[in-house]
Image (cartoon, rainbow, N blue to C red):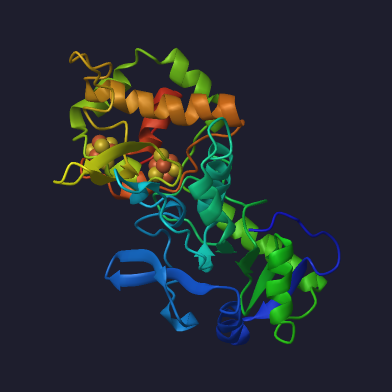
Amino acid sequence: MATEVLLGQGSVRILPKKYAAQFYKNLGVFGELHGPVQVKPGLVVFGPAASFSDLALDQVRTLLPVKKYLFPPKEEQYRFSTREGFVEPEVEEKRTVLFGVHPCDINAVALLDRVTSWKYPDPKYRARRQRLIIVGVDCIPDEYCFCLPMGSHTADEGFDLFLTDIGEEYFVQVGSSLGERMLRESWDLVKQVEQEHIEAFHQRAEERQKAFRHDLDAHRLAQAILVGFSSPVWDEVGKKCLSCGSCAATCPTCCCYDVLDEVNLDLKSGVRIRRWDDCMQPEFALVAGGHNFRAERSTRFKMRFMHKINSFKAEFQRLGCVGCGRCIAGCPADINVIEVFQKITGKKVTSVAG
Ligand code: SF4
Ligand code: SF4
């Protein structure tokens, strides 16, 4: 990832859709091409996509977000043995061009970038981030999306290129110096921006904005969570929650992990791994001696959002929920975080079906 943001001439261009497949192919010069692909009806994942026609660009959300490229569900930290000591795994040099990332997910990556370079820098994440090239594409929200009130419906940073659908063309924005090189690779396919394109861009933004269905006052959320610390809303949710952890696994900003040593039967060698962990699990706050600081499901749910909303806001000046809707779409108990946020801020609840 390059960080230089270009301003002025060359920072925006128009790509006619008839050249999109060739444009996509040209991006392959910069890394292995990946994007949203449909693996079965109703299931879209980020994965290898050799050609533009492989992409499911009309999808709203993938099962797992971009974090799976940066922070894999399970990874080896190092191997150890009495003979060789500690051996770190080799760093993979492969670059990936991830196409079709939506604004909420780009904002989530920008947040993870801050978390992983904060008090305890994560060199493995940083190394992977340097090799992940992000090409954003805009989208029209569905009933689970609420990135607009969460302030994540547009992306100002965290991408190399960003494409906005303006009908027969894409409005292409450059987000990094690498993005500019990527655009120059397809210079014969793109053209200059005219006033009509700027108008079409704003029209698309307005249409998109109108498509959001939920009323939510995110500015008051942190305060409302503190004021509503003893609210029955948490107990209501706790009664339904199954502690399955699906919401945290699919969340683009959840990044808690556990570190384990797996010792081989020879008792002389083994591997240290880290794997995703989450605060919805009953044993997450269980300590030696058997005390559990958050034994109830309601307190685990509340703690998850106090962290995402209040702690993220305090530490990173951003909310840790980007409103992607994955936790709602995938919850087996039909728990809807939009409704929880609406109730806690005293708003009228809007149904996801509405
Ligand atoms: S996905 Fe739903 S049921 Fe599972 S832990 Fe999250 S809130 Fe609870
Ligand atoms: S809490 Fe839910 S809606 Fe918010 S970012 Fe995580 S998965 Fe998306």
Tell me the quadrant of ligand 1. top left
Taking the view exactly as shown, the residue that stands out farthest to the right is: 8
Q: Kindly indicate the quadrant of the structure image that contains residue 183.
A: bottom right
Picture coordinates of residue 49, whole percent (x, y): 43, 76
Picture coordinates of residue 34, whole percent (x, y): 46, 71
Q: Look at the picture and state if 221 lies above or below 122.
A: above
Picture coordinates of residue 76, whole percent (x, y): 35, 50
Looking at this view, is 15 or 349 the one in front? 15
- Does any portion of residue 335 appear in the rendered image? no
Q: Kindly indicate the quadrant of the structure image that contains residue 298.
A: top left
Q: Kindly indicate the quadrant of the structure image that contains residue 243.
A: top left
Residue at 47 percent of width and 63 percent of height? 92
Picture coordinates of residue 75, whole percent (x, y): 35, 51
Residue at 38 percent of width and 36 percent of height? 256
Q: Look at the picture and state if 324 lies above or below 349.
A: below
Residue at 66 percent of width and 51 percent of height? 157
